[in-house]
């Protein structure tokens, strides 16, 4: 064997021995320097930001419709106690107006219940037949309503709507009604004294005006 061949074989043997000195468990050889880890570079898609939607809630106005109640007020007069005005004769009730201009009565003791007044008659009052002179018209001294007859002026020879004993009758207050049987009288400060029957007839009288129905 030549020197050259021997040297080649020795060199090959050395290479084989060197290869057998590496680890077989997968761990890096002692003293080996690990290179830097290589992280694959990925491409990140840009984020798309959706525009924010702002929802505005308008306040809801609720209109409550309340039923309208219409109230009708009727002035009901106070009721007087008939016994306060009772006269000495049965079924007679006497009163004056607060001004004492008119003297009135409700008389229920006779055949035909009657309400009437004496006092200063308005100048516009119609003349009526005189009590003592039939057919001669005179200025009335009374006004009255009786039964189903309309209110009317009269000339009374005997002033029947004064108390029989000529005593002072009590005043019937303004806005207070005196009701006896089917007759009612009341006094208003503006219009005067009114007496009416349940049959729908009556009169209203002051010293300046009157109305009969």
Image: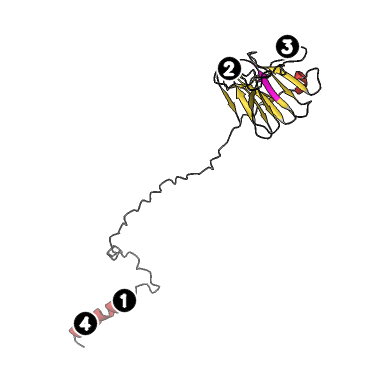
Q: Position of residue 49 (x, y in %)?
A: 31, 57
* Of labels 2 and 4, the one closer to you: 2
* Of labels 1 and 4, the one closer to you: 1
Q: Answer yes or no: do the residues labelled 3 and 1 have beta carbons within 8 Å?
A: no
Helix, strand or loop at label 1? It is: helix
Q: Gap between marks 1 and 4, in whole Å?
A: 17 Å
Residue 185 makes an appearance in the image: yes
For mark 3, what is the residue? 168
Q: Gap between marks 2 and 4, in whole Å?
A: 169 Å
For mark 2, what is the residue? 207
Q: Left or right: where does residue 109 sit relative to residue 57?
A: right
Q: Position of residue 57 (x, y in %)?
A: 41, 48
Q: Quadrant of residue 191?
A: top right
Scheme of colours in the image: secondary structure
Q: Is residue 168 magenta?
A: no
Q: Which residues are magenta?
A: 115-120
Q: Which mark is residue 8?
A: 4
Q: Left or right: where does residue 170 sit relative to residue 153?
A: right
N-terminal of the pair, mark 3 or mark 1, is 1
Q: Position of residue 181 (x, y in %)?
A: 75, 30
N-terminal of the pair, mark 1 or mark 4, is 4
Residue 179 makes an appearance in the image: no
For mark 1, what is the residue? 19
Q: Gap between marks 3 and 1, in whole Å?
A: 159 Å
Q: Answer yes or no: do the residues labelled 2 and 3 have beta carbons within 8 Å?
A: no
Foreground pick, 94 / 188: 94
Foreground pick, 102 / 67: 102
**Residue neighbourhood size for the residue with mark 4, other residues' Cα within 10 Å, grouped as few (<14), some (14–19), many (≥20):** few
N-terminal of the pair, mark 2 or mark 4, is 4
Q: Left or right: where does residue 195 sit relative to residue 122?
A: right
Q: Answer yes or no: do the residues labelled 2 and 4 have beta carbons within 8 Å?
A: no
Q: Which mark is residue 36?
A: none
């Amino acid at each position: 064997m030549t020197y050259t061949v021997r040297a080649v074989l020795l060199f090959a043997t050395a290479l084989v021995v060197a290869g057998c000195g590496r680890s077989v468990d997968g761990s890096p050889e002692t003293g080996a320097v690990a290179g830097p880890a290589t992280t694959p570079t990925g491409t990140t898609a840009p984020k798309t930001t959706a525009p924010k939607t702002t929802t505005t809630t308008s306040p809801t106005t609720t209109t409550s419709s309340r039923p309208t109640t219409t109230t009708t007020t009727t002035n009901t007069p106070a009721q007087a106690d008939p016994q306060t005005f009772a006269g000495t004769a049965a079924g007679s009730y006497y009163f004056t107006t607060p001004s004492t201009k008119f003297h009135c009565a409700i008389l229920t003791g006779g055949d035909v219940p009657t309400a009437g007044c004496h006092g200063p008659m308005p100048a516009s009052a119609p003349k009526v037949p005189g009590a003592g002179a039939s057919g001669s018209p005179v200025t009335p001294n009374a006004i009255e309503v009786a039964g189903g007859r309309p209110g009317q002026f009269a000339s009374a020879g005997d002033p029947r709507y004064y108390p029989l004993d000529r005593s002072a009758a009590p005043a019937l207050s303004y806005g207070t009604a005196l009701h006896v049987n089917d007759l009612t009288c009341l006094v208003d400060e503006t219009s005067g004294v009114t007496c009416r029957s349940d049959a729908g007839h009556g009169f209203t009288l002051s010293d300046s005006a009157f109305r009969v129905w």
